[in-house]
Structure formats: structure tokens, C-alpha cells
Amino acid sequence: MARTRPPRKGLPLAAFLLLLFVLTATTAQAAPYIRTLSVPGLPLTVLLDERDGLIRSAYLRSPSGTDELPSLKGHRLVRENRSRPYVDSDWRADLLWQLSFAEADGKRGIDLWIAHLTRRPRLWVAESPTGATLWDSLSINLDLPPGSALYVSAILPPYDENKPAREGRTLSFVYTIGLTPDGPSFIIVPSVYHRLQEMTLLLAQAEGDEVLRGRYDSLAKDFGAMAKGQHPSAEALSSFGWRRLLYREWP
């Protein structure tokens, strides 16, 4: 008498649900995703076309049209900072918007700066290169005035024409960016640079590399001058990696 084979049992419910979750998560990760970033009350939108967490294309929409942001390709958004000061003497808050992006390995990146004034609607967009520095591992409380933000450069100025600038896990120059009636600009906030000078002097004393210690001393000297409202050295100004991408205005 031939035996009949018992019906095959399916996966237990818990295992089936786990498999379904893994497949869904994998598919979702690989699928394209449109991220929309906007500021309430302002006609500005950043569109990020992402796949696997990295940007494939990016655009900025405003009443003046749609502008592509090609330098963001291959990056991922890591943080953003918005400041809404009153700069141009009307009742509507203006905007300084800092969006920070990093490459896949996290070693380099871009800060995207979007500034908008409302009285006579104007828009500025700029970018500045970033990278991993020693500042990333330090906790410093800085009291920034409204309408300002920090740009932490990836570069420690050479302070010696015979030596290249330093990048990587070292201190670097820090620039205070402020929104002015003429758009975003490098400004000097003495209280911020006083605190940065204190921290730089402490790290210079503990630095075992004599060459690097000398550069930290020069960096602290620059910060000290700015703590008094003075301009930094020519080396610091030449290391300011700021590039304007576009300017727009509309009625």
C-alpha cells in the first residue's frame, strides 16, 4: 500500500514575519526616496533624490524657479541648522539655513548655506567644504547671536609658506557666518573667538608634535585677535573655502 506524503508545513508565523520584515527593509533601502526640506512660511524647498541613503540629485525650488545643486551628489544629509533673525527691517523673519552633508565615508563633506531676506525677496546659496577635525570630538558651549552659525573648516592654515595646510584629526579654523543685509558673510563675534582661543591654548600645551603645537599657537593668536574685534591673519582669510553658487530675487 503506497504511503501518502504528509502536506509540507509552512514557515512558523514568527519566522515568516521576520523574513517579510527583512525583505521589506532591503527593498525600501534600495528604492529611490525623495526627501523634501522646507521652512514654514517661506517659499523655499530643497528636494533630495536619494538611493541607499546617498543623494543622486538635488534641487532648490523658489519663486524664481528650480536650480540644481550638483555638488551634493554622492553625499548624505547629516544635520541642519536654521536661524530666523530680523535683518532687513520688516515684520517677517529672515533665514540663515545651514545644511551639512557628508560623503559616504564621512571624511569629507559640504556645508550648504541658504540665506533669504523677505523685505525685497532675495536668495543666496553658497557652499563650503568640510571634513573630520579634532573639533568634532570636543564639547564647547558657544553662545551664537541670532542669525549666525559656525563654519568649521577642514583646514588648519599653514602659517608658514614653506609648509602645506593640515587636514584630518587636528584643530582647524572656525569661521562665524552671519546673515547681513547683503547676504551671508564671514563676521567676527568676539565672545565666540574668546572661547575658541581658550580651548586652542589648552590643546596647544598638550600637543606633543612641535610643528603642530606651533600652528596651534598661531591659531590661538588669530582667535585672540578676533576676540578683540580685529581681523585674522592673511593665512586664515586665504583658507576660507567659501563659494557662492547662485543669487536670485523676485517681486
Image (cartoon, rainbow, N blue to C red):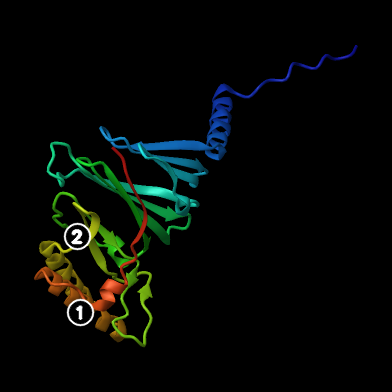
Is 29 on the left-hand or right-hand side of 177? Answer: right
Name the foreground residue: 100 vs 209. Answer: 100
Of callouts 1 and 2, which one flags the residue occurring earlier in the amino acid sequence? 2
Furthest residue toward left: 228
Q: Amino acid at mark 2?
A: Ile
Q: Would you identify the image quadrant in which residue 213 lies?
A: bottom left
Q: Residues within 10 Å of mark 1 (few under 14, many from 20)?
A: few
Image height of 29 relative to 137, above or below: above
Furthest residue toward right: 1
Q: Which residue appears at 27% of the width and 35% of the height?
A: 42
Using the image, tell me which numbered label, if any, was put on residue 140.
Answer: 2
* Residue 209 in sight from this viewpoint: no
Give the SS element for disc 1. Answer: helix
Q: Where does the image place residue 95, in percent across and percent down from the top left? A: 23, 44
Q: Where does the image place residue 243, in percent across and percent down from the top left? A: 36, 61
Q: Amino acid at mark 1?
A: Gln
Using the image, tell me which numbered label, if any, was put on residue 205.
Answer: 1
Furthest residue toward top: 1
Task: Locate the C terminus by quadrant.
Answer: top left
